[in-house]
């Protein structure tokens, strides 16, 4: 644990540490860990099938067989994944509270296991799955499965009662999918080289956060400045539109044809040019230097 808490990629990649870790892993811990991760990976496969594959096999309404398959997969997620994770979280939360193992974050006591990525990520995933369950369209349609609407039938998700819940359900589904993949980073333990790479990623992520903070500051500054000018550019007609346009420029997603219309607005063009120079020539190179320094 102290090796991981030190967060030093050179130390954890030392040959002696690698040899010692490999011995413990191959002789004792591998199979216990592997069994849990295989089940978690199977859960993710079922989740992908129910949310991203079975619902998009063809255009139009799902067939009865697809309804049954989707319901079976989602029921497995709620019972076999959500309930299991919820039990684990309650058990670990109780253990930390009974042992007084708390960490203060901003003056608020927090169970220590939530301060690491896997513990906090699992708790966030459980909360997301519970929210998904409350918005599940199949459950909302359970009282009106055979109504007069397209796609009616057993385990349908097309009833009028579910329409107002589908959007927020899809948002929770997207977040849960990302969290499932994020928690799969535990599998990097099978390779010390990949584990060291992941450790480096966590080590330099704070520098990326500073870059994004500086980017947000510049976008806000230039968006408000450009909107105060007397111009006729629709992309910068308000602070919101200007910020969105500048964000697209930062990601090189802004249509190049729109730059031609700026030629009639020299002050807008000058402000955008200064913004591009600051982002492309200054901030990006500064980010590279920060990442290099953080790694060393």
Image (spheres, rainbow, N blue to C red):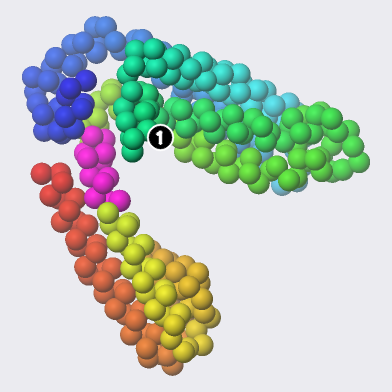
Q: State the residue lying farthest toward the top.
A: 28
The answer to whether residue 39 is above or below residue 228 is above
158 with respect to 269 (left or right): right
The residue carrying mark 1 is: 182
Q: State the residue lying farthest toward the right.
A: 148
Q: How many marks?
A: 1
Question: Front-most of 201 and 90?
Answer: 90
In the image, what residue occupies the spot 8% across and 19% down? 16
Q: Main secondary structure of the magenta part?
A: helix
Residue 6 appears at what percent x and percent y? 16, 29
Is residue 38 in sight in this rendering? no
Question: Dividing the image into 4 quarters, which one contains the C terminus?
Answer: top left
Span colored in magenta: 198-209
Residue 112 appears at what percent x and percent y? 33, 24
Mark 1 nearby-residue class (10 Å; few <14, some 14–19, many ≥20): some
In the image, what residue occupies the spot 13% across and 17% down? 19
Residue 199 appears at what percent x and percent y? 23, 34
Find residue 270 and report its image quarter: bottom left
Question: Front-most of 160 and 51?
Answer: 160
In the image, what residue occupies the spot 41% across and 80% down? 226
Q: Secondary structure at mark 1?
A: helix
Find residue 102 and report its image quarter: top left
The answer to whether residue 271 is above or below residue 4 is below
Question: Dividing the image into 4 quarters, which one contains the N terminus?
Answer: top left
In the image, what residue occupies the spot 15% across and 56% down? 289
190 with respect to 261 (left or right): left
The answer to whether residue 88 is above or below residue 281 is above
């Amino acid at each position: 644990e102290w090796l991981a808490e030190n967060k030093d990629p050179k130390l954890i990649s030392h040959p002696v540490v690698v040899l010692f870790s490999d011995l413990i892993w191959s002789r004792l811990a591998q199979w216990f860990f592997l069994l849990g991760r295989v089940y978690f990976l199977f859960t993710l496969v079922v989740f992908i099938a129910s949310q991203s594959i079975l619902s998009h096999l063809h255009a139009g309404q799902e067939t009865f067989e697809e309804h049954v398959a989707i319901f079976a997969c989602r029921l497995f997620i709620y019972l076999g994944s959500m309930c299991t994770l919820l039990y684990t979280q309650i058990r670990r939360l109780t253990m930390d509270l009974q042992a007084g193992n708390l960490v203060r974050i901003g003056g608020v006591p927090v169970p220590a296991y939530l301060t690491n990525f896997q513990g906090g990520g699992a708790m966030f995933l459980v909360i997301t799955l519970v929210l998904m369950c409350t918005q599940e369209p199949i459950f909302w349609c359970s009282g009106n499965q055979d109504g007069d609407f397209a796609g009616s039938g057993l385990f349908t998700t097309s009833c009028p009662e579910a329409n107002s819940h589908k959007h927020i359900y899809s948002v929770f589904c997207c977040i849960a999918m990302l969290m499932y993949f994020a928690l799969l980073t535990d599998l990097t333990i099978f390779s010390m080289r990949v584990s060291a790479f992941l450790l480096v990623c966590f080590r330099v992520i704070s520098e990326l956060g500073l870059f994004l903070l500086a980017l947000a500051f510049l976008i806000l500054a230039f968006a408000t400045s450009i909107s105060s000018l007397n111009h006729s550019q629709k992309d910068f007609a308000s602070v919101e539109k200007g910020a969105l346009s500048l964000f697209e420029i930062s990601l090189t997603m802004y249509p190049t044809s729109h730059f031609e219309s700026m030629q009639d607005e020299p002050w807008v063009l000058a402000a955008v040019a200064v913004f591009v120079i600051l982002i492309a020539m200054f901030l990006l190179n500064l980010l590279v230097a920060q990442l290099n320094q953080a790694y060393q």
